[in-house]
Amino acid sequence: MTKYLASVALIGLMAGSVQAGEIKLGMTTWVGYGEIFLAKELGYFSDLGLTVDPQIIEEGSLTMAAVASGELQGTAATIDEIMKYRTPEMCFKAVYALDDSHGGDGILAGTDVKSIADLKGKDVAMNEGSVSQFWFNILLKQNGLTEKDVNIVNMTADDAAAAFMAGQVPVAVTWEPHLTLAKDQHIGQVLISSDKTPGLIVDVIALRCDTVKDHPEDVKALVAGLEKAHEYLLANQEKAYEIMAKGVGGWLSDPKDFAASAAGVQFYGKDRNAEFFKDGATGESGKLVTLGGEIWGGLGKLHMDVKYDDLVDTSFLQ
């Protein structure tokens, strides 16, 4: 265990008991988290006696440290991302799936690159340890390559896109709005985007195990509020995007920008959650956990052998 994780585990063990009736969630600025803000604004959580406090924290490690300390009760993040922080001492479970990326993530490359195989020997800018590295490794594996066949240049997704557009790197793994910006400015091409790989980049809400165990009614209210927000989105998309844009903020604060980015994700809701988590460890979600173990485990990023039941609790979906 690294020094960071050891200290996080100690903080987690020292954290006080979780208070009923409030759930604080950390997350980055991402369109797929909009329904959390929608449910809060429309009063769907408060109607069920729950206060939800979504907090934007752009660095995942800081979010998970806050979860470990008890400052936050959970996080919204991709399944593969949370796997990297799961330890025997730091327990949390995914209780609801929010969205998956359908074009919101992609690879920018020069027009001379015709396939993933053509990336061999090239510098590739990406954020190591992020979902970008996870997704990129899946693509490499599908094409008979590994990271040893390219030169990874570690930088944030934003910096990777900026470096590509400035001609400083030939390839960048990034996400919106950078894919659209590159296309609009006719700089290179989007070699592949996540619309070609549905179901691989899936965002979930993961909560501390003590929250799940000690306050099941709060978790039930959280899930119910999110399901109701999804129904509102389906029936009132334009108004929903206005509310979600205001809540998420940042580069998504303009409803037009939010709507454009929302075209690159699939919001889940009750029915899609049932489908995604169907059959547990042998189903769609289970296969993604297995894939996360293979990719992150192969890169030495896991701190335990994460099994499906270590990471997922679907009891609040039934």
Image (tube, rainbow, N blue to C red):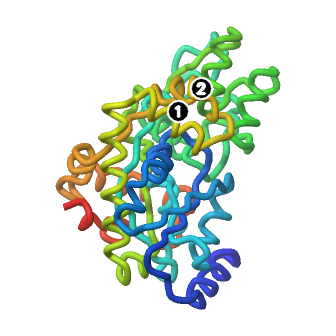
Q: In the image, what residue occupies the spot 46% across and 77% down?
A: 91
Q: Is residue 19 left or right of residue 178?
A: left
Above or below, 31 relative to 179: below
The reply to whether discs 1 and 2 touch (Cβ–Cβ < 8 Å) is: no
Q: Amino acid at mark 2?
A: Asp
Please tell me how many numbered marks the rendered image carries. Answer: 2
Q: Is residue 290 visible?
A: no
Q: Which secondary structure lies at badge 2?
A: helix
Q: Which mark identifies residue 242?
A: 1
Coordinates of residue 25 in the picture (x, y in percent): 54, 62
Q: Which residue is mark 2?
A: 257
Q: In the image, what residue occupies the spot 63% across and 27% down?
A: 177
Above or below, 233 relative to 81: above
Q: Amino acid at mark 1?
A: Glu
Depth check, front residue: 189 or 185: 185
- Quadrant where the N terminus lies? bottom right
Mark closer to the observer (1, 2): 1
Q: Is residue 57 left or right of residue 79?
A: right
What separation in Å lies between label 1 and label 2 (alpha carbons)? 10 Å
Whichever of callouts 1 and 2 sits on the residue coming sooner in the sequence is: 1
Coordinates of residue 131 in the picture (x, y in percent): 54, 46
Coordinates of residue 215 in the picture (x, y in percent): 37, 79
Depth check, front residue: 232 or 7: 232
Residue 180 position by quadrant: top right
Coordinates of residue 4 in the picture (x, y in percent): 69, 75
Q: In the image, what residue occupies the spot 21% across and 56% down?
A: 282
